[in-house]
Image: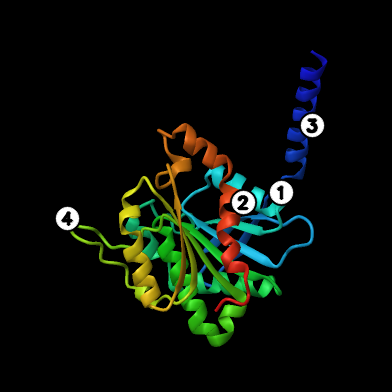
Amino acid sequence: MTSDRSRKTWALIALLAAFACRADPVEVSLHLPSGAEIVSQRYPARGESGRLLALWLTDGRSEDEQKAAADMATRGVETWVTDFLAPYFLPVLSSSWSQIPEQDLREWLETLHTRNPGQRIVLIASGRAATLALRAANDWQARHGEGAANRLAGALLMWPLLYQELAPGQEPDYDPIVRQTHLNLVILQPKSSAGFWWRERLKNFLEGAGSRVWLNVLPGLRDGFYGRGDITPREISASARLGEMLLDGLKPLLDKDKP
């Protein structure tokens, strides 16, 4: 009886400690020359780290993404979660990502670069938002040349949907940005999704353009698993570890010796 009570007490203490250590977000609004206002949820890193700045490009404010960002911050990676569709009143459609102005994307990333000296930037995106991350990286490299790699560590893409509209029975025809990208990339690909069967083809296209790609398969998961209405017990468990999953995926991008 006493032992059981003791275990419950320690479990409660551990839970309270976890909440106490969790990073609280700060809302940051950046007003661009175009008049657009980009709003981000910034999760400052605890402790000393500060060497990496993760910019998470999303299409909404998922509670699971916010929790994952907070978990990453408590482990030393400052994370900004940014809804890039809301400022332009764009619906969550595959065609919306191409409507985000190139100039605004450039000004936003350049402002963050200027305000956070000494930090390497990594881009995070999932699904169709992956095209936006690659566009941002491509523009960054065009602007900064050989020095771009010193500040842009790469991008982590979850189940990226980088193909154009796909006709039944045809192989995917990728967005032109795929052939323009030469970047360090990590791809997290759920196994229980259509993209799993095209994973090596996408990897070959990206590597053919000059990117270095680390491909991690996620067994038992589907695209967008943490936001599904029919989420499975395994996906619920993975959702709780999303921040840890992203940090593990980022490891190859943190090695400055890699090209």
Query: Residue 169's mark?
Result: 4
Separation of residues labelled 2 and 1 (CA atoms): 9 Å
Is 184 in front, or is 70? 184
On the image, the x and y values in percent for residue 222 come to: 40, 44
On the image, the x and y values in percent for residue 254 come to: 62, 68
Separation of residues labelled 4 and 2 (CA atoms): 38 Å
Do tag 3 and tag 2 residues touch (Cβ < 8 Å)?
no
On the image, the x and y values in percent for residue 63 come to: 56, 42
Query: Residue 81's mark?
Result: none
Do tag 2 and tag 1 residues touch (Cβ < 8 Å)?
yes
- Label 1 neighbourhood size at 10 Å, few (<14), some (14-19), many (20+)? many
Disc 3 target residue: 13
Disc 1 target residue: 23
Q: Residue visible at 73% across and 40% down?
A: 18
On the image, the x and y values in percent for residue 237 come to: 54, 37
Separation of residues labelled 4 and 1 (CA atoms): 46 Å
The image quarter in which residue 208 lies: bottom left
Q: Earlier in the sequence, mark 3 or mark 2?
A: 3
Q: Earlier in the sequence, mark 3 or mark 4?
A: 3
- Label 2 neighbourhood size at 10 Å, few (<14), some (14-19), many (20+)? many
Q: Earlier in the sequence, mark 1 or mark 3?
A: 3
Query: Residue 69's mark?
Result: 2
Separation of residues labelled 1 and 3 (CA atoms): 18 Å
